[in-house]
Image (spheres, rainbow, N blue to C red):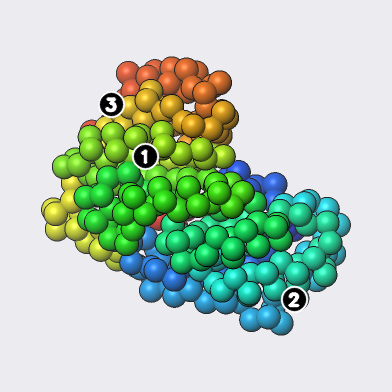
Amino acid sequence: MSNSDSKTLLSPENIVYRPPVEAASMILEVSIGCSYGKCTFCQYLADKIPLQLIPREELISNLINLSLTGSTTPDLFLTGGNVLAFKTAYLLDTFNLVHMYLPYVQNFRMYARADDVLHKSREELSALASAGLDILYIGIESGNNEVLTLCNKGETRDQMLESLSILEECGIQYGLSSILGLGGKEHSREHTEDTISFYNQTSPASIRVMTLTPFDHSPLADAIQQGRFHPLVQKEILEEELLLLENLKLLSNECLFVANHVSNAVPLIGFLPSNQEQLITILKNNIQHSKSAKPTQISPGKW
């Protein structure tokens, strides 16, 4: 994403993180960083970026600039590692402020952690839904508690499932994401199987899978260098993804499956279950011809 994107106003790092499915949405920078920032694989920990609000005067300036683009897109993505962590009153005020400058915006989307959901009452979540919050993007990373502990996610499988159940009660959709290879060689099977069983208890609007790409100076990168974590090679990553795709039986009638991140060796996108067999066939063909015996190497700067 570049400075030339008229729908985007970038952070000082000139990087905006947003789900691929939000490519057509307007993007408003409201915060940078993450309120948790302790996951062993994450840039927020490696770069020590705390959750910070964009000053209100800058927020208003950004809204004015967006209003001048001529776009009437009804969907707006609010940037930041987990914007839902902010107080409900602030979020509602921000929604109202957006409507002053962009009256055609109807739907607000943002990243969240499961514990952000659990820290809000059902009344607060329902109020946000009524004000236009329609999709939260939540990284579960893994459905296996041991892997979640090893990567210091700070949440358990049951807590994440509870948060999704609450969102469904409050009428808020959710997109989920997980990380291929997060269990390393030691925990690959249970990481994949438990992530499958987690997904199969949910009704996501989308699922996004990425390949593990530790940021420089992150604890996980250090663990790899010291031989305490053994990353998967490309063929093993594809085999994890194949096992996942072959066994997904979601509660939702239709779910967009997205695996076209720069870290993914085989770009995939399609709807489940309607395109599931085609995606499986593509993966099988690539596994058959995969000869890589080295861990996947991706520049973290492209994350």
Write down the residue under mark 2. Answer: 60
The residue located at (27%, 45%) in the rendering is 144
Write down the residue under mark 3. Answer: 291
Task: State whether residue 231 appears in this view.
Answer: no
Which is in the foreground here, disc 2 or disc 3?
2
Mark positioned earlier in the residue sequence (2 or 1): 2
> Where 214 falls versus 210 (above or below)?
below
Q: Label 1 amino acid?
A: Phe
Does the CB distance between marks 1 and 3 fall below 8 Å? no
Task: State whether residue 86 appears in this view.
Answer: yes
> How many other residues sit within 10 Å of disc 2, few (<14), some (14-19) or many (≥20)?
some
Q: Which mark is residue 269?
A: none
Q: Is residue 270 left or right of residue 178?
A: right
> Where 191 falls versus 166 (above or below)?
above
Does the CB distance between marks 2 and 1 fall below 8 Å? no
Q: What x and y, as percent, mark residue 164?
A: 47, 49
Q: Which mark is residue 198?
A: 1
> How many other residues sit within 10 Å of disc 1, few (<14), some (14-19) or many (≥20)?
many
Compute the Cα span from label 1 to label 3.
31 Å
Q: Secondary structure at mark 3?
A: loop
Res. 192 image quadrant: top left
Q: What x and y, as percent, mark residue 30?
A: 62, 70
Q: Label 2 amino acid?
A: Ile
Q: Is residue 281 left or right of residue 174?
A: left
